[in-house]
Amino acid sequence: MVYWAIIAFILYYVSKRTIFGRQIIAVGSNDRAARLSGNHVEKVKLRVYALMGLFVSIAAIIQVSRIGSMDFSNAGRGMEMDAIAAAVVGGII
């Protein structure tokens, strides 16, 4: 759990204190307004997708280390309530 706290702190810092974080917020809020403001929307989206791929690979490595193998049929068994709780806390529902 410590590594997730470290990643969350780094992402918070990036989103609040860097130009890249402000560009992400601008593109996420209004794509057209960000483009008219001079942001390179396609470059920002590409960087965000690459960053997301990095985080997905980290999550996959952690998941494989937790279950001990690459057994895809049982990979998410028993984690349904965790997913629902994460969605509710995140404001999806």
Image (cartoon, rainbow, N blue to C red):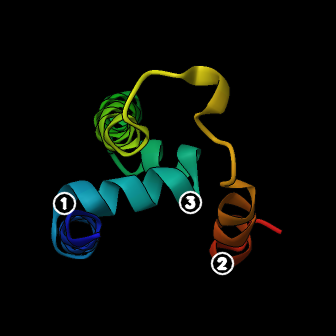
User: In the depicted view, which residue is nearer to us: 85 or 18?
Assistant: 85
How far is disc 3 from disc 2 in space, using C-alphas? 21 Å
User: In the depicted view, which residue is nearer to us: 19 or 50?
Assistant: 50
50 above or below 44? above
Give the residue displayed 40% in from the left and 26% down from the top: 69
How far is disc 1 from disc 3 in space, using C-alphas? 15 Å
Residue 33, position in %: x, y?
53, 52
Q: Are marks 1 and 3 in contact (CB under 8 Å)?
A: no
Horizontal arrangement in the rendering, residue 87 relative to residue 8 (left or right): right
Secondary element under disc 1, as helix, strand or loop, is: helix
Residue at mark 1? 19
Residue 87, position in %: x, y?
70, 65
Give the residue displayed 33% in from the left and 54% down from the top: 23
Which corner quadrant holds the N terminus?
bottom left
Residue 18, position in %: x, y?
16, 65
User: Label 1 sits on what residue type?
Assistant: Ile
The disc placed on residue 89 is 2
Mark positioned earlier in the residue sequence (2 or 1): 1
Give the residue displayed 70% in from the left and 72% down from the top: 85
Residue at mark 3? 29
User: Label 2 sits on what residue type?
Assistant: Val
Residue 60, position in %: x, y?
38, 35
User: Label 3 sits on what residue type?
Assistant: Ser
Sort mark 1 into few (<14), some (14-19) or many (20+) by Cα contacts within 10 Å: few
Q: Quadrant of residue 81?
A: bottom right
